[in-house]
């Protein structure tokens, strides 16, 4: 048996497992920045091509999601800027997202949560999503963002304070 071939097969199997385990997270995270599902899928492809280029020899000092987050963010923002540069006046209308159906206004309605989160400054929203949606620890979020842990803590503190003060969020906490 050719051991070099067997090692390559194991590497391909490992990469495929990583892809299947993380692809939804990568697309959803990219969508946060692009607000376009097709662009998010393109970002996913670019991110995994980047990751593949790091094989073999990739040595992680943190979780894979912590490693990938800055790559996703950079790639998604770059795609968004590029799309904005090339969008002509006729193309803009055809590329606008379909109107959303209004929410029910009931607690747990995604439209209300989205409105509240959108009202937060981007840096506060980003740390909340990393911590509470993506499940990163404070240290992992700090590494992913390239900021000190104290900055992450401060941003979370200010975001939570803003949410507590927002009358629109009170209904989510009423019993």
Image: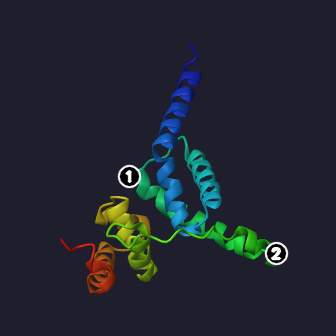
Identify the residue under disc 1: 63
Dividing the picture into quarters, in which one does residue 114 lie?
Answer: bottom left
Identify the residue under disc 2: 90
Disc on the earlier residue, 2 or 1: 1
Q: Residues within 10 Å of mark 2 (few under 14, many from 20)?
A: few
Instruction: Give the image location of residue 107, x and y in percent.
Output: 31, 70
Disc nearest the viewer among 2 and 1? 2
Q: Residues within 10 Å of mark 1 (few under 14, many from 20)?
A: few
Q: How is the image coloured?
A: rainbow
Q: Quadrant of the N terminus?
A: top right
Identify the residue at image location x=58%, y=17%: 2
Secondary structure, mark 1, is: loop
Q: Are discs 2 and 1 less than 8 Å apart at CB?
A: no
Instruction: Give the image location of residue 101, x and y in percent.
Output: 53, 68
Q: Quadrant of the C terminus?
A: bottom left
Secondary structure, mark 2, is: helix
Identify the residue at image location x=26%, y=79%: 170
Identify the residue at image location x=30%, y=76%: 156
* Depth check, front residue: 81 or 142: 81
Instruction: Give the image location of residue 140, x and y in percent.
Output: 34, 61
Give the alpha-carbon distance from disc 2 to disc 1, as whole Å: 43 Å
Q: Is residue 70 left or right of residue 104?
A: right
Q: Is residue 159 left or right of residue 93?
A: left
Q: Is residue 162 left or right of residue 115?
A: left
Residue 160 appearing in the image: no
Relative to 8, say whether 124 is above or below: below
Q: Residue furthest front?
A: 104
Dividing the picture into quarters, in which one does residue 113 lie?
Answer: bottom left
Identify the residue at image location x=38%, y=65%: 130
Dividing the picture into quarters, in which one does residue 79 lie?
Answer: bottom right
Q: Residue furthest left?
A: 175
Instruction: Give the image location of residue 108, x and y in percent.
Output: 34, 66
């Amino acid at each position: 048996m050719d051991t070099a071939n067997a090692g390559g097969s194991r590497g391909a199997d490992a990469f495929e497992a990583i892809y299947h385990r993380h692809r939804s997270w990568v697309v959803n995270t990219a969508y946060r920045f692009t607000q376009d599902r097709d662009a998010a899928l393109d970002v996913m492809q670019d991110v995994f091509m980047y990751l593949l280029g790091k094989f073999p020899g990739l040595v992680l000092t943190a979780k894979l999601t912590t490693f990938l987050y800055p790559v996703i963010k950079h790639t998604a923002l770059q795609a968004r800027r590029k799309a904005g540069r090339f969008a002509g006046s006729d193309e803009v209308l055809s590329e606008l997202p379909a109107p959303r159906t209004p929410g029910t206004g009931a607690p747990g309605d995604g439209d209300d949560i989205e409105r509240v989160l959108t009202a937060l400054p981007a840096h506060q929203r980003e740390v909340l999503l990393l911590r509470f949606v993506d499940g990163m620890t404070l240290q992992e979020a700090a590494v992913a963002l390239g900021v000190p842990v104290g900055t992450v803590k401060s941003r979370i503190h200010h975001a939570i304070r803003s949410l507590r003060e927002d009358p629109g969020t009170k209904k989510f906490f009423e019993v």
